[in-house]
């Protein structure tokens, strides 16, 4: 057992890493309950050892969601977190503490659903929405106005409003939307999003609002930050009604309770009805109702002393794992899925659970026929937590991934750098289908009328195996397919023709090189003159590109070294597809080849408008400041990019200087 100082340091580092994954990457690797347990262990240790300075400990600070690519903005009133508990006894202690503080009062609490979304603060000035900011570190957050404006239920104007008003709430994604998005991804052979909360968090931090619009989000508001003049409210319970008057979406139900025991009764009632709410509800927030008492109770460094979150335990159930099914993705990656005896969990019937990869199966020693504990927390995709060894059949054998693949006739190899098995044969029909679906998808070559059903028929009938085959298709080939008439065949031929002019990054993304997603494809286009230059680049040259790491560089290099892929690239070239980077296609514009980074809000231009102006003048934008950046276009609240540009000597332009440059 290590000494407490070491243990504290290790836990702090571990929690900081989980915070980064949850708040910044929107890709947590542990569930809320496991995270809260880690934090509770750390808090206990710190309480026993006050000698180890803990001002900066994650137990005392608010998890930070800020990203470099966004301008930061200071909240007028801090956005704090909440202390939380899973225990009714601790909720009672919270009530007792407040009673000791206010002995002569009847304490009234407002009990609200706790929404499992992403916190946001909307600023209205003279009744007009001017800004949306994420929680950030509680003091300053990211300016996410552009993406938040894509949420339809936010009023742009509110009547009879105070001069300055910060409205606080949560952005979330409806279950139904989430399921639709994942179904489309599954059909396209793309990896699935883990849960609505992570998808919502990732979506509001997309750099392209047009892309954010493709993933509909909702919002619910429950609180007020700054309010000037400040005589609007005297109690928490008044906020809901006022927000409703202003046409904000509000909580479906809140309860006023006299005393903490009554509040507990409301929480129990909430638990019975929360499945029917539009938003994911993972607990209750109990708030002392009167603002005068809230002010007296005050705050710790990260949370109010007048409120607490009670979180419901994630739902778990035991069921039998019937088989481990292996699914094939666009790059030929094989993903294991548990096929379960259907079981009721968190309001839905669960019959599948993710098993992640071979190592996960081995670590938990999960075997077909086992009775397993399944959990569905915030995750829509349930997880297998553990195996009930008492129920294991006597003849059970460990799951042998490789042997299983062989038995299914799938020729796959394990990627030495990862836990992933991948199909070896390029001509495996399922792999071909996934690859073509991906190539044709919106985020890649955007080929209209080339959906899953068409791709499936093309592969099954031997009409297309690789993307190059698509460009050989004739109208008469297509007329033989189900549901194809002359018009639809012509349309598809036209769509294929149009796709030849797509930007290079769309083609790179469409090729399905393992590890290379949309952003990396854009990074590659920005750094090389053509696909040929990328194909000829060494691993070192690839790794020198901003945003490309060692593993990705190796993967790209290996992909282009494969003779089948070399032949594919040659054929695409022969069909006349665009293989040139837009940076080499000289526009003759005043910003030809110049790389801009945008930060902060400009007085008269949105980020989109500025980007369009830069691109129309022959320049391009990048997400981060580096030595290669030609200009930083900086508005109000420019944040960390401003200081980085200053450090690197990158010229910084305001809107006026930018316009002057365009006219030069
Ligand atoms: S009140 C000063 N009410 O939960 C405290 N927060 O775990 C302000 N949350 O940061 C928060 N539902 O993002 C409040 N009904 C609700 C909530 C709620 C969800 C979020 C909020 C907060 C986090 C803390």
Image: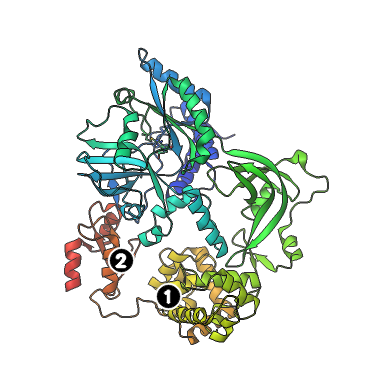
Q: Residue at x 31, y 51 (%)?
A: 143
Q: Position of residue 217 (x, y in %)?
A: 41, 51
Q: Is residue 25 visible?
A: no
Q: Is mark 1 within 8 Å of ligand 1?
A: no
Left or right of 78, for residue 368: right
Left or right of 337, for residue 71: left
Quadrant housing the N terminus: top right
Position above or below: 435 against 355: below
Counting other residues with Cα less than 10 Å from the Cα at mark 1, is it few (<14), some (14-19), or many (20 or more)?
many
Residue situated in front as seen by the camera: 31 or 173: 173
The colour scheme used to paint the residues is rainbow
Q: Is residue 577 visible?
A: yes
- What secondary structure is marked by label 2? loop
Give the Cα distance between marks 2 and 1. 21 Å
Quadrant housing the C terminus: bottom left
Q: Position of residue 465 (x, y in %)?
A: 60, 78
Q: Position of residue 107 (x, y in %)?
A: 38, 19
Q: Which residue is mark 2?
A: 629
Q: Position of residue 178 (x, y in %)?
A: 50, 53
Position above or below: 7 against 446: above
Q: Which residue is mark 1?
A: 504
Left or right of 153, for residue 330: right
Q: Earlier in the sequence, mark 2 or mark 1?
A: 1
């Amino acid at each position: 057992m290590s000494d407490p100082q070491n243990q504290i340091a290790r836990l702090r580092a571990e929690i900081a890493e989980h915070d980064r994954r949850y708040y910044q990457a929107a890709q947590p690797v542990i569930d809320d309950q496991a995270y809260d347990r880690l934090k509770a262990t750390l808090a206990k240790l710190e309480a026993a050892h006050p000698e180890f300075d803990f001002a900066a400990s994650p137990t005392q600070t608010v998890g930070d969601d800020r990203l470099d690519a966004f301008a930061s903005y200071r909240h007028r009133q801090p956005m704090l977190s909440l202390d939380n508990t899973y225990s009714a006894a601790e909720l009672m202690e919270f009530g007792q503490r407040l009673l000791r503080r206010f002995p002569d009062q009847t304490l009234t609490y407002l009990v609200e659903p706790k929404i499992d979304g992403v916190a946001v603060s909307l600023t209205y000035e003279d009744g007009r929405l001017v800004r949306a900011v994420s929680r950030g570190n509680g003091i300053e957050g990211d300016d996410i106005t552009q993406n938040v404006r894509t949420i339809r239920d936010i009023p742009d104007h509110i009547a009879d409003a105070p001069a300055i008003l910060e409205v606080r709430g949560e952005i979330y994604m409806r279950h139904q939307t989430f399921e639709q998005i994942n179904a489309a991804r599954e059909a396209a052979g793309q990896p699935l999003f883990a849960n609505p909360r992570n998808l919502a968090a990732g979506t509001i931090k997309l750099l392209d609002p047009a892309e954010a619009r493709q993933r509909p989000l909702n919002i619910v508001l429950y609180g007020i930050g700054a309010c000037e003049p400040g005589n609007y409210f005297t109690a928490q319970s008044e906020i809901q009604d006022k927000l409703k008057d202003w046409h904000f979406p509000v909580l479906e139900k809140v309860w006023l309770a006299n005393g903490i025991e009554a509040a507990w009764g409301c929480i129990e009632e909430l638990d019975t009805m929360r499945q029917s709410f539009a938003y994911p509800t993972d607990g209750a927030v109990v708030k002392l109702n009167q603002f005068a008492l809230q002010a007296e109770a005050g705050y710790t460094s990260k949370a109010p002393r007048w409120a607490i979150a009670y979180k419901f335990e994630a739902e778990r159930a035991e069921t039998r794992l019937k088989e481990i099914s292996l699914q094939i993705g666009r790059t030929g990656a094989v993903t294991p899925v548990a096929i379960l005896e259907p079981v009721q969990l968190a309001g839905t019937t669960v019959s599948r659970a993710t098993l992640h990869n071979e190592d996960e199966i081995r670590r938990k020693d999960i075997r077909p026929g086992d009775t397993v504990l399944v959990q569905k927390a915030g995750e829509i995709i349930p997880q297998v937590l553990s195996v009930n060894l008492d129920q294991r059949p006597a003849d059970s054998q460990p799951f042998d991934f490789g042997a299983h693949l062989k038995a299914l006739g799938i020729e796959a190899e394990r990627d030495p750098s990862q836990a992933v098995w991948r199909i070896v044969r390029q001509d495996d029909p399922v792999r071909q289908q996934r690859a073509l679906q991906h190539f044709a998808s919106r985020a890649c070559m955007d080929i209209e009328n080339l959906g899953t059903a068409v791709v499936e028929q093309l592969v099954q009938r031997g009409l297309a195996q690789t993307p190059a085959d698509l460009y050989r298709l004739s109208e008469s080939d297509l007329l033989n397919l189900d549901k194809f008439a002359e018009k639809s065949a012509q349309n598809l031929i036209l769509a294929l023709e149009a796709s030849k002019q797509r930007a290079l990054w769309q083609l790179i993304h469409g090729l399905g090189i393992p590890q290379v997603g949309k952003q990396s494809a854009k990074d590659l286009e920005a750094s090389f003159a053509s696909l040929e230059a990328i194909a000829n680049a060494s691993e070192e040259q690839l790794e020198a590109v901003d945003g490309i790491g060692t593993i990705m560089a190796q993967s790209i290099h290996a992909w282009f070294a494969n003779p089948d892929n070399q032949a594919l690239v040659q054929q695409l070239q022969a069909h006349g597809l665009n293989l040139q980077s837009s940076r080499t296609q000289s526009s003759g514009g005043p910003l030809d080849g110049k790389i801009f980074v945008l930060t902060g809000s400009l007085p008269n231009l949105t980020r989109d408008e500025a980007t369009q102006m830069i691109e129309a003048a022959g320049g391009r934008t990048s997400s981060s400041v580096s030595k290669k950046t030609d200009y930083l276009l900086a508005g109000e609240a420019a944040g960390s990019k401003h200081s980085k540009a200053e450090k690197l000597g990158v010229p910084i332009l305001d809107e006026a200087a930018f316009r002057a440059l365009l006219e030069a």
